[in-house]
Amino acid sequence: MANALPDNAFRELHEGEAYEPLMSPDKHYPEVNAWSVTWGILMAVLFSAAAAYLGLKVGQVFEAAIPIAIIAVGVSTAARRKGALGENVIIQSIGACSGAVVAGAIFTLPAIYILQAKYPEVSASFLSIFLSSLLGGILGILFLIPFRKYFVKEMHGKYPFPEATATTQVLVSGEQGGDQAKPLLLAGLIGGLYDFIVATFGWWNENFTTRVVGWGETLADKAKLVFKVNTGAAVLGLGYIIGLKYAFIICCGSFAVWYLIVPGMALLFPDTVMNQWDPSITLAVGDMSPEQIFKAYAKSIGIGGIAMAGLIGIWKSRGIIKNAVTGLGSSRTSQSSQGAQAAQSVPRTDRDLPMKIIGFGTVLTLIAIFLFFYLGVFSGSLLYAAVGILLVGFIAFLFTTVAANAIAIVGSNPVSGMTLMTLILASVVMVAVGLNGTGGMVAALVMGGVVCTALSVAGSFITDLKIGYWLGTTPAKQESWKFLGTLVSAATVGGVMILLNETYDFASGELAAPQANAMAAVIEPLMSGVGAPWVLYGIGALIALALTWCGVPALAFALGMFIPLELNVPLLVGGAVNWYVTTRSKDQALNKARGERGTLLASGFIAGGALMGVVSALLRFVGFNPISQAWLDNPLSEACSLVAYVLLIAYLIKASMLRSGRSI
């Protein structure tokens, strides 16, 4: 087995060229065994608990693939296991269910507890949370498997797959050992220490904004213009891996919202209170801060753009979807016509679960969801249960490709935006068939939870499958054991969510649960007869159509419109660093070597920052929180963050700039 990825791993293949993974398709390697399954389950439990707390605290779900990969490499090395690459992929694949299932649960289901403070009859049991997460996760896996070949093989080199790239580098470095792993480990230590200091001790502010100076504050208050950048190491590394092209498109969407739409709304409607869809909005647009305008109005334009970009992507992928539904893809047709012997002739690295199992499993899962709705959500109403399963099945299947596309492009799944759209559509439809009030609120949120988990797991799973494709694992084994990881994560997040609500009370605001609060704010007026911001959704949809007509990737642009400015700008910074280090020399081999070393360093930033994010969350969970809010409110803390950020960027550039094209 080779100890380095081929040079065509991250680029498009030439005519007639084939990609050969590290683990040869003609050989068999240890993958699924007691070691890998046990460690995978342990990772799923630990990271589900950590991700649930962190997500409810700050609204950001921790993506566990990278730190789990690091731990897998570490324990395999400590145990002196030979040829552990296949085992480590399975550990990562099972354990990474944690972040995906957690996102599906905490973005929606805590809204039930939030509404319970106002409507005591609203309630959610462990069983309902568990089943919503489990069934949604299973549905997402089954819906994604037919698209595996398209995303990971046919589109090879056309998508950056940032998180999969970083995780793969971690796993490969573990196989290489020695000097090859040193840049990753050093960058991981630097990035981890950097983010740990910020998250745990608050030595400097996490964000730098133009409000740090007087004229910047005035500009924000009067003209509604503000510049913000997250100075974290992990986000900088993510931008490097995404690259300048997509980072620029994402930031164009963000700049369009923050520098055109937000100040434009304040200029055109300074005395208007647009609260038809949200009675909690009582301020006129002109009296709002830029952040409030973004949250109340402009973000909805991004949701509309994401939804339309998703529909456009579905239309463009209609042939792929047709093959997925009918099982008429060329390779599967060949297998079905030639029987089991032909299926065995398919290379090990290209074997999926049989279409019969996928189809049968999908039908059984949909039946289980229907029974869950009929008996546990809609109190025996056949009509409501039938309408609910049709909505959930249709929306989850259509948006599976959207989730996979988003992960492949930017490494971030706009699942909360798609779920919000699902909640709105579900509420409108359920009200139309006669279900409203508190019963409708709970039903819509549970339906949203199933869809949200399905899309979150589908998006996460495409990362696992791409990692497996690069390294040469057996897809069918990844697919089979992903169900176990989903089961363990669903049980864990259900218990943790109830525990956190009992400890902190989501309605109290001590745990912010921002997505769940947004879902509650949207669902309550809809089920009470108040409308939704259809005009804003429509504007976003028109923007997506115009971008598509101009040949601009609408999904990347719309993601920029939806994700906060401070998280988009560092993507552009990281992408610019990538461009800089790969264009300074006339020697293309040297530029390529520098780019690969930079990718390794950026992966270390992501891995270190992610691991320390979990450690910091656990420390806060046990009550260790020495951060001084007074210091963070001091402009000097932001000035310190800018200095630290510049030093971090300088390190990434200098450490990437090899003097020769030697191996990294």
Image (cartoon, helix red, strand yellow):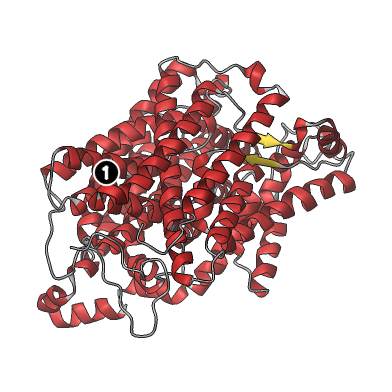
In-image side of 572 versus 61 (left or right): right
Q: Position of residue 567 (x, y in %)?
A: 60, 44
Local packing at callout 1 (Cα closer than 10 Å; few below 14, some 14-19, many 20+) is: many
Which one is nearer the viewer's eye here, 263 or 247? 247
In-image side of 202 versus 366 (left or right): right
- The amino acid sitting under disc 1 is Gly
Which residue does the image show at 76% across and 39% down from the upper left? Answer: 290
Task: Evaluate whether residue 24 shows in this view.
Answer: yes
Q: Where is residue 413 in the image (x, y as percent from the top left)?
A: 49, 51
Q: Quadrant of residue 437?
A: top right
Q: In this picture, is 101 found above or below 358? A: above
Which one is nearer the viewer's eye here, 122 or 94? 94
Q: In this picture, is 569 found above or below 142? A: above
Which one is nearer the viewer's eye here, 439 or 648? 648
Give the quadrant of the N terminus.
Answer: bottom left
In-image side of 35 versus 110 (left or right): left
* SS label for mark 1: helix
Q: Mark 1 points at which residue?
A: 485
Q: Position of residue 368 (x, y in %)?
A: 30, 48
Task: Evaluate whether residue 120 shows in this view.
Answer: no
Give the quadrant of the C terminus.
Answer: bottom left
- Of all residues, the one furthest to the front in this rendering is 659
Q: In which quarter of the image is residue 145?
A: bottom left
